[in-house]
Amino acid sequence: MSSATGAERSERDVRSERSEVILNVNFQGFGQRPAAWQVQDVQARDLIDERFYQRVAQIAERGKLDAVFFADHPAFGNPNPRPLGLAEPFVVAAAIAAATERLGVIVSGSTTYNDPIELADRVLGLDLVAGGRIGWNVVTTYNPVVSGNFGLSENPDRDARYRRAGEFVDLVTAHWRSAQTGAAYRHNGEFFEAEGVAQSPASVQGRPVVFQAGGSPQGRDLASRIADGVFAVELTEASARKHYEAVKAGAVAHGRKRSDVAIVPGLSLVLGSTEAEARALYDDLESRVPDSYALGALSSVLGADASGLDLDLPIPAELLRPPTDGVSHTASLGYRETFLDWIGSRNTSVRDVLRDFGGYGARIIVGTPEQVADDIEHWFRSGLADGFNLMIDRFPDGLSAFVDEVVPLLQRKRIFRTDYATPTLRSRL
C-alpha cells in the first residue's frame, strides 16, 4: 500500500486521472452580473423564448464545452434588478437538447420538493431523447421562500433534508438500474416506500449523470457516496484543496474510486482585452445595481440581515463567527464556510467586501483571457479542481468572448479538447 500523503495523492491522481479540464456553463438568466440585461442587445421576453437559450447553448457547443448547468428557482421573486429563472429548467433543457448535438445539459431538481420515481422518469426520458447528454443536479433547497409554494410553513431542517436526499437518490438510481437490467426493485425507508420495474429502457450513457450541489458536511458525504460531479463553492486555494481531498477520500471510503467523482467549483468571469478594460466593464456593471442587491447576497451567506450595516465600517465580528450548529444557520453552510476562510484581512469595510465579493459566493476573476486561462490551468494542475462551472458575466456576449478568446489558450496548454471525442456527457467526466 502506498504511503503517499493525501495532498501528494490528490495532485498526482488529478494529473493521471484527467488530462482535460471540465468546463460547464452555469446558465443564469442574462448573465451572472445583475445588470447584464442593461448592456446587451437583449429583450425582456428572451428569458421565456427557447431561441435565446438555444443560441447561447450553441455558442457553448461551438467552444466544445462539456455542459450547460441550470439551477432552479421554484419560487416567486422580484425580477428587478436581476431577471432570473423565468422558465422551468426541464423545459429549457429539452429545447437545448433539440438544438445541439454533443453539449450536455445538467438540470437541478430538488429532493425536498419532488417525487423520486416521477423525477427519475422525467430525467431518464430527457436523457433518452437527448442521446445520453443529461445530468441531474441534486439539491435539497434551503431557500425558505420555496416552502410556501408547496403548502408548507417552513423548510425541513438540514438533517432531515439530507436524510431524505440520500434516500431519494437511492430510489432514483434503483429505478435507473431497473431500466438497465429489467429487474424489479423494492425500497422501504424513512421517507419512501416503492417497488416496481422501470418501463423505459436505459439511455445511451447507461443512466443520467448525477451532480450534487451542497457544501455542508452532510452534502459532501452525500457527494462522496453518489455523485459523478460536485458543483463546489471555493474562494481560496487552501479550502479548495481541503474540500477536494475530503470528497475524494470520502468516495474511497464508500467503496468508489477517487476518479469516480469530479470536483467542479464555480468561477465568475468578467473579461477584457486588458485588465483595465475588464475592470471598467465590471465597475460599469456594478454601478447599475443598487447596494441592496449585493447586501442581500451577503445576508444570505452570513445568515443575518446585512442591510443595516454601515458601508464604510468593517463587518461586525459577531457576524463572522462560525455557526454554533447547523440547525440555527438555515442558509448554506458551504457558502458561509468558504466565505469565512476568504474574508481574512479583506474586512476593511462592508463596501470593500461587497466589491471583492463580486462572485456572489463564487471566486471571481476580472481580467484578460490570458489571466483566466493561466488561473484555470493552475487550479487544474495543482489538484484544486477537476474543472469549473463558469459563471459568465453576460449572456450571450460574455460567453462568446470566453469561447473565442479563452478556449484557444486552454487548447494550446493541452488541457482542453479541440473537438468532442465522445457523444455522451458521462464519457467526458
Image (cartoon, rainbow, N blue to C red):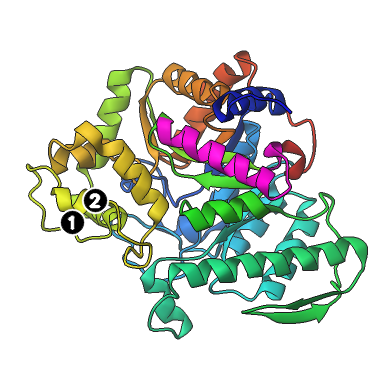
- The magenta segment is 238-260
On the image, the x and y values in percent for residue 81 come to 28, 55
Q: Quadrant of the N terminus?
A: top right
Question: In the drawing, does residue 249 fall left or right of residue 160?
Answer: right
Q: Quadrant of the C terminus?
A: top right
| Up/down of 421 relative to 78, above or below | above
What residue does disc 2 label?
321
User: Disc 2 residue type?
Assistant: Arg
Q: Is residue 55 visible?
A: no
In the image, which disc is placed on residue 306? 1
Q: Is residue 185 visible?
A: yes
Question: In the drawing, does residue 153 fall left or right of residue 354?
Answer: right
On the image, the x and y values in percent for residue 35 come to 31, 46
Element under label 1?
Answer: loop
| The one of 64 and 175 positioned closer to us in this rendering | 175
Q: Tell which residue pokes out farthest to the bottom in this image.
A: 151
| The one of 104 and 17 positioned closer to us in this rendering | 17
* Picture quadrant where residue 6 is located: top right
What is the crowding at mark 2: few (fewer than 14 residues within 10 Å), some, or many (at least 20)?
few
**Measuring 91% from the left and 69% from the top, which residue is drawn there?**
183
Question: In the drawing, does residue 20 fall left or right of residue 332?
Answer: right
Q: Tell which residue pokes out farthest to the right in this image.
A: 182
| Up/down of 196 relative to 283, above or below | below
> Do callouts 1 and 2 mark residues in contact (Cβ within 8 Å)?
no
What is the crowding at mark 1: few (fewer than 14 residues within 10 Å), some, or many (at least 20)?
many
